[in-house]
Amino acid sequence: MVLFKKAKDLKNWIGRHMATGTKTGFVPTMGALHEGHLSLIKTAKNENELTVCSIFINPKQFNDLSDFNNYPVTIENDIRKLEQSGCDVLFLPTIEEMYPPDNSVNLHYELGNLESILEGKFRPGHFQGVCIIVDKLLQIVSPNTLYLGQKDYQQCMVIAKLLELTDKKQITISYCPTLRETDGLAMSSRNSRLTIEARGKATAIFQSLQYLKTNFADRELEFVKNEARKILTENGFKIDYVEIVEAETLSSIENWDGHTKIVALIAAFLDDVRLIDNLKLN
Ligand code: AMP
């Protein structure tokens, strides 16, 4: 695996490969890699000649400073895992490399209501930060395909919108399924911050989602959402949201019409660790 720390070096190197028609897949991450991340790498490897991964904990997408300060860093393990998975290139920039102090342009992306609902509502500025960094990374890597995890359901929609806004429609997005632990907890870098006790309770998120999937068609949505909230609070969660929305638009719905595709999304804290997950209900 080739490791780049400078954007210019990586851009030049990739440019030479692209000139010969090399198909490139890109997996942006914030590191503390787990099997979920590696499944994206594996898919990218199967579908491309060159697989590029980036690890960058992007300060601009953290609306909560303590979340940023406590974000797990396991870089040596990450490099080992990437090498074992056959990843070709790792981009590992510093904060100064991505945000040079003398080059602070205030970009704003018109994300519409994506920015004011669900994650957008509870993490002000988060998706602007995501767009700033993904936009920069795509200008450096220019992949044919971008691999994203459905675990971050709304982020997938935000990045699709970003490609539209920045005229990068030549880039295909591959949406990859959420990998889970055996008890259903969605794999996440933040899981490593859970205490043993909290880790035991964390599976309640998946149980709530499964409850919603089993019951949404037979009951009022407000009722099932409240029952799902109870499962979470009984297990010590502090809830940001438990919502059922249209899968294509994230528009809220009060009653299901019997055919629209819908998805349940949850964000909740266990102690000071914020976890998110989602499940398509039909
Ligand atoms: P992160 O390092 O959390 O920014 O995630 C990097 C990429 O990995 C994003 O596209 C995530 O959606 C994806 N990802 C994170 N967790 C999982 C998971 N459990 N299964 C599949 N993809 C995931």
Image (tube, rainbow, N blue to C red):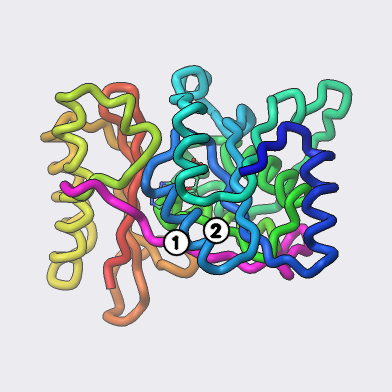
Residue 178 covered by magenta stretch: yes
Query: Is 122 in front, or is 8?
Result: 8
**Res. 226 visible in picture:** no
Q: Residue at x 33, y 44 (%)?
A: 187
Q: Is residue 68 left or right of residue 219?
A: right
**What secondary structure is found at the residue carrying circle 1?**
strand
Q: Pointer 1: what residue?
A: 176
Q: Which of the two discs, 2 and 1, labels the residue nearer the N terminus?
A: 2
Image position of 234 with respect to 206: above or below:
above
Image position of 171 with respect to 41: above or below:
below
Q: Is residue 279 left or right of residue 175?
A: left
Magenta span: 164-183
Pointers 2 and 1 in contact (CB under 8 A)? yes
Q: Position of residue 135 (x, y in %)?
A: 72, 48
Q: Residue at x 37, y 32 (%)?
A: 190
Q: Pointer 2: what residue?
A: 147
Q: Give the amino acid at mark 1.
A: Cys
**Res. 29 visible in picture:** yes
Q: Give the amino acid at mark 2.
A: Tyr
